[in-house]
Image (cartoon, rainbow, N blue to C red):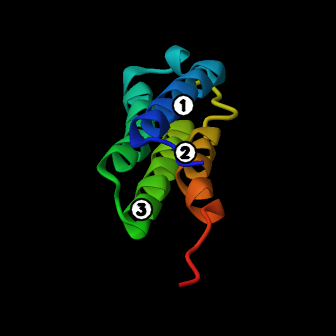
Amino acid sequence: MKLSRWVVAGLIVLLGCLQAWDSGVFAAGPFVQVLAWTGIAIPATAALLRASFLGTMAAVIASAVLEIAARVVSPVPLPELLLVSVIAALLLFVPAAVRPRSTV
């Protein structure tokens, strides 16, 4: 199944925002919120731009680093915020991994 890049980006943003809300990002300060939202936006942008494999990998790693930084500097606990990067990685890499390869 081939997902449109707009669908993948929309799913990353939707599921990322839901996970950030569930983790309690809104109770943290504005700096932590900016880190979290940027961590959500980077993989979605990589999906829209159809980045190369290395570009997509860099986007997911940058997202994870930003989410970890948000957890470290946050005055409130953000228990499952790193799941945003896991969701993004699954949506970006699994369709490419299960795509049938041409044998010709």
- Residue at the disc numbered 2: 88
Disc 2 is placed on an element classified as helix
Which mark is first along the chain, 1 or 3? Answer: 1
2 to the left or right of 40: right
Most foreground residue, 18 or 102: 102
Residue underneath mark 3: 58
Instruction: Name the kind of residue labelled 2 in the image.
Output: Ala
Find out whether the residues at labels 1 and 2 contact each other: C-beta distance under 8 Å. yes
Q: Residue at x 51, y 20 (%)?
A: 28
* Real-space Cα separation, disc 1 to disc 2, in angstroms: 8 Å
Rendered image: mark on residue 29: none
Identify the residue at image location x=51%, y=15%.
26
The residue located at (41%, 55%) in the rendering is 59
Real-space CA distance between mark 3 and mark 1, rounded to the nearest whole angstrom: 18 Å
For the residue labelled by badge 1, is the local secondary structure a helix, a strand or a loop?
helix
Amino acid found under the numbered disc labelled 1: Gly
11 to 29, vertically: above or below: below
Quadrant of residue 71 within the rendered picture: top right
Q: Nearer the viewer, residue 39 or 5?
A: 5
- How many residues crowd around disc 3 within 10 Å: few (fewer than 14), some, or many (20 or more)? some
Q: Earlier in the sequence, mark 1 or mark 2?
A: 1
Q: Is residue 49 above or below residue 71?
A: below
Mark closer to the chain start, 3 or 2: 3
Res 16 label? 1
The furthest residue to the left:
49
